Image (cartoon, grey):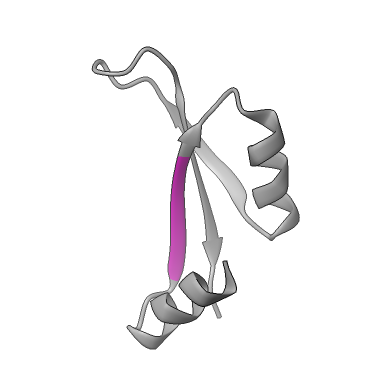
Amino acid sequence: MNFVENRIKENSGKTAEIHIVNNNEILKEWYIKLGYKEIRVERPRVLPFEVGIINKSLK
């Protein structure tokens, strides 16, 4: 994740945003431990599951 976050910053990005399968609690907790916060949950019509959107401010 450090590599990706550094690349975002190098390209003047301020936020990393990730979309995950919302009911994958293990993955969600891993991202939270890395400093990400859950911002919303969506239910796309084309997918049979909810998508959790998480992000992290990059300073």
Q: Which residues are magenta?
A: 15-19
- In the image, 21 versus 13, the foreground residue is 21
Q: Position of residue 58 (x, y in %)?
A: 53, 74
Q: Is residue 26 magenta?
A: no
Q: Position of residue 4 (x, y in %)?
A: 47, 71
Q: Quadrant of residue 8?
A: bottom left
Q: In this rendering, is residue 35 above or below 11?
A: above
Q: Quadrant of the C terminus?
A: bottom right
Q: Position of residue 56 (x, y in %)?
A: 55, 61
Residue 9 in picture, x, y percent from top left: 43, 82
At horizontal 59% and vertical 22% (from top left) the residue drawn is: 23
Compared across the picture, whether 49 is left or right of 27 comes to left
Identify which residue is drawn at 71% across, 47% down: 30
Q: Is residue 27 above or below residue 18?
A: above
Counting the numbered discs, the total is 0
Q: Is residue 41 left or right of residue 26?
A: left
Which residue does the image show at 61% across and 28% down from the upper left?
Answer: 24
Q: Quadrant of the N terminus?
A: bottom right
Dominant secondary structure (helix, strand or loop) of the stretch shown in magenta: strand
Residue occupying the far bottom of the picture:
10
The residue at 45%/21% (across/down) is 50
Q: Residue furthest top?
A: 48
In this picture, is 8 found above or below 27?
below
Left or right of residue 23: residue 5:
left
